[in-house]
Amino acid sequence: MHIPLIDSLEKYRRRNPVRLHVPGHKGGQALSPVMRQGDLPGWDVTELEGLDDLHNPDGAIAAAQQLAANLYGARHTFFLVNGTTVGIHALISATCAEGDMLVLPRNAHRSVLGGLVLSGARPVFLEPEIVPEFGFAAGFGKDRLKQLLPRRGVAAVLAVHPCYYGVVGDLAGVSELCRRYSVPLIVDEAHGTHLRFHPALPADALSLGADAVVQSVHKTGGAFTQASWLHLGTGRVQREQVARTLRLLQTSSPSYLLLASLDAARQQLARHGGDMLDELLEITQETLRELTRIPGLVVLGKEHLGTCGALDHDPTRLVVSVKGLGLSGYEVGRRLAAGYGVYVEMADAFNVVAVLAPGTGREDARALVRALADISLEARRDAGLPRVVIPSPAGPPVPPQVTTPRRAWLSPQRSVPLEESRGRVCGEIIAVYPPGTAIIYPGEEITPEVIEYLLQVRASGLHCQGAADPALRTVRVAD
């Protein structure tokens, strides 16, 4: 008779939580009225006469995709019901073949592994710059590409714009360099659906010359979770190749509720996106002013980006360093949720990150300010108490690549104790989640630095994804 998942969801809902996390519709507050007033159970259907077919659209879905393409200035837009993850898989598979080189930043989301395994591409990782004071990885600039692009075998460049922390780099410069060498630039813009709709925000990837872009519309665009879209900006990424890959990877029973939420989100952004962001940016500035008055907190701004190669920051992605409190971001995140009903998007060793998406109200932002002021006061009272050592979000140095992720993933594997894995070839991806940046990929050598970092992760009890043993007692290695 138990319904444990529904019970847990209801327990969360009944707390009347402050939702400073994705999805960006904030529990329905920022959903398009079309969706709020719609007959959702009645819309949960299959590919019936007159409702089109996601995998070969020529009717309603095709028209909805064309409207989205028009809004973003894209050549073509694909609706995705398997999240931005499937879009990343499709773009890597459409641009890279077995043995080709894919250049990408190390702080790319772990979803790139699927594209690497499917395509057989060899990743060439660029270590990103670290933002001082906050300790997280930002991105890479065009200078890091200049030595790589002239090489034979570079099939594509993947950039993240913006990163999980809202920071963007010189994507225009990267795009210009990729055009010079006729290498497609594909962009993970999961956190940037809203950027196009306000001049005070960083420019979106398509306007900066990206060839193909994937956006998580559910994060900041007002769609349901798992609803994303993929834009093609130029002819350097072949439309039919992307469509062919999506037909292979996406479910054969797409949710019309997700598709409808994409159509409704597009209309709402087109009609009201600028006005919604005007209000949101006003709330954001008020919140920033209040947070900077709280002892022990530092709020990320453009002034912190000068030495790390980053150019700009999305102010609606509120990144707050809590190092000055003597607490980890994880601890502050737990206190916010347990003591105040304030749920932030993520935390790491040094920071908490709140998503102020369109629809966030003033009272939600004020609740965050009040809660952090209380936590600051408590932390100063408890100064001097022993603290748990939390590993830096920047992670260990990139380990040597022994073979491709595909070969390691498909090879025979076995589990060995983490402490005894030095020198072995890793057979799985291990990522602290969030933010989902891989500590080690399949095909990479397990170095002493990786082992030490994973031991710290294990001792801290941080949540991992990808590992067969999420407690990190053992690790899978390729024989």
Image (cartoon, rainbow, N blue to C red):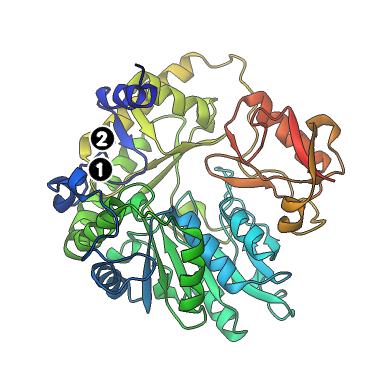
Q: Secondary structure at mark 2?
A: helix
Q: Residues within 10 Å of mark 2 (few under 14, many from 20)?
A: some
Q: Secondary structure at mark 1?
A: loop
Relative depth, front residue between 241 and 313: 241
Relative depth, front residue between 375 and 415: 415
Look at label 1 and name its amino acid. Answer: Thr
| Residue 88 % position (x, y) | 52, 61
| Circles 1 and 2 in contact, beta carbons < 8 Å | yes
Look at label 2 and name its amino acid. Answer: Asp
Q: Residue 360's mark?
A: 1
Q: Residue 364's mark?
A: 2
Q: Is residue 169 visible?
A: no
Q: Residues within 10 Å of mark 1 (few under 14, many from 20)?
A: many
Tell me what residue is drawn at x 72 percent, y 44 percent: 396
Relative depth, front residue between 246 and 220: 246
| Residue 11 % position (x, y) | 31, 21
Quarter where residue 391 is shown: top right
Quarter where residue 446 is shown: top right
Can you say whether 147 is above or below 25 in the image? below
Can you say whether 193 is above or below 470 in the image? below
Tell me what residue is drawn at x 58 percent, y 66 percent: 92
Tell me what residue is drawn at x 63 percent, y 71 percent: 96
Q: Is 83 displayed left or right of 399 in the figure?
A: left
| Residue 287 % position (x, y) | 30, 40
Can you say whether 365 is above or below 340 in the image? below
Quarter where residue 197 is shown: bottom left
Q: CA distance from mark 1 to mark 2?
A: 7 Å
